[in-house]
């Protein structure tokens, strides 16, 4: 699946002061599926014990094996490293022998693992005798797997090692598409707006009402104001990490979000140390949604002669949380560009 991102997006790793951003780590290993296990015991035994089938089920860190010769195993796995440990029980109907197998090992990828299998046989009747045996084992997947790079039945996608990290396919082989428009987040120009054609300017998210861009000066600056659309209103928006400004289709500014404080639950005030970048967000009034005002430096000294002016408020992955544009612009004598919604 495509993972191309628009090239003009600003890259920044700044976060809002006092706001902790975290995300759950994606599963690196999922062994669920059909496997063939080869075991080399220290004491030769029936061939069926050397090569046998295992059905593995993994749910997070929980791991369960159902074997063709040794009964069921249960245990845990560390999905980030592939290390696992299991134990089980089973009974031989001939001797009444109780199996007590244990298995430890490491999955090197989604299709291979290696480790040690230990088998204790406790026999209550003669002539069957107790046996303790162990030896190396290897496992090879013989069925489809999420993470093998092939979209198998039951999977919506499979980007191999990119699953869970590329913004398109999750660690469980499901398409990452929160707005359900058929375009994965990494390729969606506005992940919060349902737009299968990818031709909407996302103005339904951010209602940019005024923009004044003055590139000349030391430095120049842009001042913008508007509203975050009611459909996106809710808790105070604190996930913004950077801002990008386009004028006439050209990137004119890309700045990190300055440190912020929230003196009230309905107000966010942000200011850079040099005072060149300022953001104020608040709610209330007759119109639902969040009002915002932004002042940001514009380093490009070239006069801005035509619109539209577009503002993007981005998250830590450079995805637009809000995006809006105003196209009715007029160049002024002092080199500024003044834009207003009709």
Image (cartoon, helix red, strand yellow):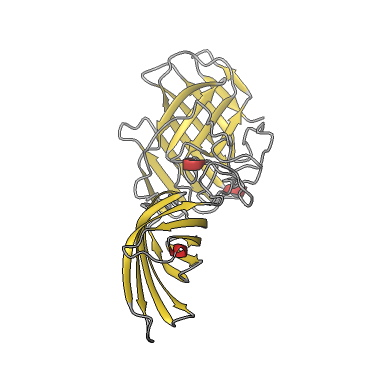
Look at the picture and state if 190 lies above or below 37. Answer: above
Residue 293, given in percent of the width and then of the height, sits at: 48, 37
Look at the picture and state if 221 lies above or below 278. Answer: above
Q: Is residue 83 left or right of residue 152?
A: left
| Camera-nearest residue between 59 and 99 | 99
Identify the residue at horizontal 33%, vertical 74% (top origin). Answer: 131
- Does the image show residue 92? yes
Residue 232, given in percent of the width and then of the height, sits at: 58, 48
On-image quarter of the N terminus? top right
| Camera-nearest residue between 65 and 150 | 65
- Does the image show residue 287? no
| Camera-nearest residue between 157 and 323 | 157
On-image quarter of the C terminus? top right
Residue 229, given in percent of the width and then of the height, sits at: 60, 44
Displayed quadrant of residue 115: bottom left
Give the residue at the far front of this rendering.
Answer: 127
| Camera-nearest residue between 18 and 160 | 160
């Amino acid at each position: 699946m495509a993972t191309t991102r628009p090239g003009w997006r600003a890259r920044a790793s700044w976060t809002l002061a006092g706001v902790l951003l975290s995300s759950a780590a994606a599963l690196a290993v999922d062994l669920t599926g059909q496997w063939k296990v080869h075991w080399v015991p220290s004491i030769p035994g029936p061939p069926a014990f050397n090569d046998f089938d295992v059905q593995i089920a993994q749910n997070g860190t929980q791991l369960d094996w159902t074997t063709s010769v040794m009964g069921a195993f249960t245990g845990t796995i560390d999905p980030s490293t592939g290390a696992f440990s299991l134990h089980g029980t089973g009974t031989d109907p001939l001797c009444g022998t109780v199996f007590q197998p244990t298995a430890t090992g490491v999955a090197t990828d989604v299709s291979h693992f290696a480790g040690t299998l230990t088998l204790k046989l406790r026999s209550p009747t003669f002539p069957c005798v107790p046996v303790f045996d162990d030896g190396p084992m290897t496992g090879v997947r013989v069925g489809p797997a999420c993470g093998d790079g092939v979209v198998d039945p039951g999977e919506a996608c499979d980007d191999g090692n990119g699953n869970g990290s590329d913004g398109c396919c999750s660690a469980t082989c499901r398409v990452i598409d929160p707005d359900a428009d058929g375009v994965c987040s990494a390729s969606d120009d506005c992940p919060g707006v349902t737009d299968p054609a990818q031709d909407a300017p996302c103005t339904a998210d951010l209602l940019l009402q005024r923009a004044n861009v003055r590139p000349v000066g030391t430095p120049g600056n842009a001042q913008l104001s508007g509203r975050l659309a009611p459909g996106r209103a809710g808790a105070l928006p604190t996930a913004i990490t950077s801002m990008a400004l386009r004028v006439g289709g050209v990137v004119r500014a890309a700045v990190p979000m300055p440190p912020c404080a929230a003196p009230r639950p309905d107000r966010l005030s942000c200011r850079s140390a040099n005072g060149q970048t300022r953001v104020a967000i608040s709610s209330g009034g007759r119109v639902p949604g969040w009002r915002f005002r932004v002042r940001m430096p514009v380093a490009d000294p070239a006069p801005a002669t035509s619109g539209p002016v577009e503002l993007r408020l981005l998250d830590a992955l450079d995805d637009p949380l809000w995006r809006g544009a105003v196209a009715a612009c007029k160049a002024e004598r002092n080199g500024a560009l003044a834009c207003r919604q009709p």
